[in-house]
Image (tube, rainbow, N blue to C red):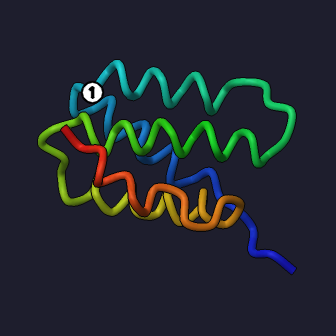
Amino acid sequence: MPSTISSQPFHALLADLKQSGFTAHSAQLERVLNGVWTTSSELLGELGQVVIAVRKECRPLTDNQKILIKECLRQVRKAWPGFGLFSFFHRA
């Protein structure tokens, strides 16, 4: 039986980003979390895209935000193994 996926790290990251002033990224994460999706895999893929954008574009990230990003990606990888592992090649 696959392990359960938790939305908690995504909500925690959303709150932390909002508090740190990353309003555009927190708003995008909130839109995805509150969106309507055909499947949970689709939702996780969309969440993963936002988390990768946060990791790439938001500077500086706090240690807590880095931990939350890693946990969010762990959740995404339950449905999409390997998701985001090589995104560091695309950093500007």
Residue identifier under label 1: 22
At x 27%, y 41%, the residue is 56
At x 26%, y 58%, the residue is 64
Q: Residue 76 occupies which quadrant of the picture?
A: bottom right
- Relative to 89, does residue 92 appear above or below in the rendering? above
Left or right: residue 12 versus residue 19 is right
Q: In front here: 38 or 87?
A: 87
> Badge 1: how crowded within 10 Å, few (<14), some, or many (20+)?
some
Q: Quadrant of the N terminus?
A: bottom right
> Which percent across, then down, holds residue 86?
39, 59
Left or right: residue 74 versus residue 56 is right
> Which percent across, then down, holds residue 41?
76, 48
Q: Quadrant of the C terminus?
A: top left
> Which percent across, then down, holds residue 3?
75, 75
At x 20%, y 59%, the residue is 63
- Relative to 86, does residue 35 appear above or below in the rendering? above
- Relative to 66, does residue 19 appear above or below in the rendering? above
At x 47%, y 36%, the residue is 50
| Residue type at the position of mark 1 | Phe
